[in-house]
Amino acid sequence: MNKSVSLMLSVLVVGAALEPAANAVTLSVIPEATSANVGSTFSVDVVASGLLDGAAPSIGTYDLDLNYNSSVLSFANVSFGTGLDVLGLGSIQAPDPSTPGKVNVFELSLDSEADLNQLQHDAFKLFTLTFNAAAVGSSALQLTISALGDAAGNSLDATLQNGSAAVTPVPLPPTLVLFLSGLLGLALIHTRRPAGRPSIPGLVA
């Protein structure tokens, strides 16, 4: 191998080492763990991160499913973030909660590729899901991707960080606890009291 070829290969290797690695998009359920009492509501955010401010890739569309245990949770509503609507022009949104145990959420940006690449942040909320805590138990909150595309329409790979929810019984109010404790105390006193008064000779009742 001559010196010029060797030098060229060395430059290519050094250049490859200095080139920044491609950004890895992460889709996360936040908070990762949620606890709620039966009858209450709670919300979780689905957040995209790992992008670059003012540079490609940006997210132009997504079609995601969030799966949950329908015997423990019931779906209430969905609200969208503004990450795919950087100029306030609106976006095409299509949530579908019709399948028990699954909410499908679709969004397509109407902004241009240049505007999305320049104005979309490195981390932002895609949407928020609100659930009713229907019964005691636990539920995974698991994302699956049907489609995820950048502003140019190219497919994006993503790492998923899922979450979970625990539903617990409704705690007794402190005043009710005190009341029940008092009733228990009275019942114990009643059970320990002698059945009748002792008789005293020569004493007329």
Image: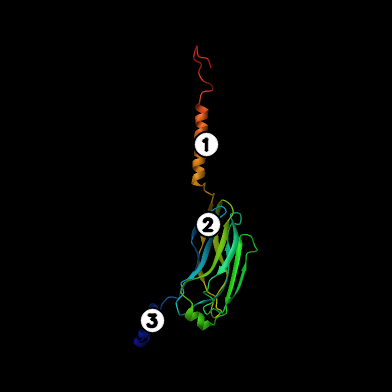
Which element is circle 3 on?
A: helix
Local packing at callout 3 (Cα closer than 10 Å; few below 14, some 14-19, many 20+) is few
Residue 56 visible in rendering: no
Q: Which mark is residue 15?
A: 3
Identified by mark 1, the residue type is: Leu
Residue at figure coordinates x 49%, y 38% from the top left: 181
Identified by mark 3, the residue type is: Gly
**Marks 1 and 2, Cα distance to the nearest angstrom?**
36 Å
**Label 3–label 2 contact, CB within 8 A:** no
**Label 3–label 1 contact, CB within 8 A:** no
Residue 185 visible in rendering: yes
**Quick one: quadrant of the N terminus?**
bottom left
Q: Which mark is residue 183?
A: 1
Front position in the image: 95 or 181: 181
Q: Quadrant of residue 99?
A: bottom right
Residue at figure coordinates x 52%, y 36% from the top left: 183
Left or right of residue 165: residue 98: right
Please identify the residue farthest to the bottom as the structure is shown: 4
Identify residue for label 2.
165
Q: Earlier in the sequence, mark 3 or mark 1?
A: 3
Q: Residue 91 location, x and y as percent?
A: 58, 76
Left or right of residue 18: residue 204: right
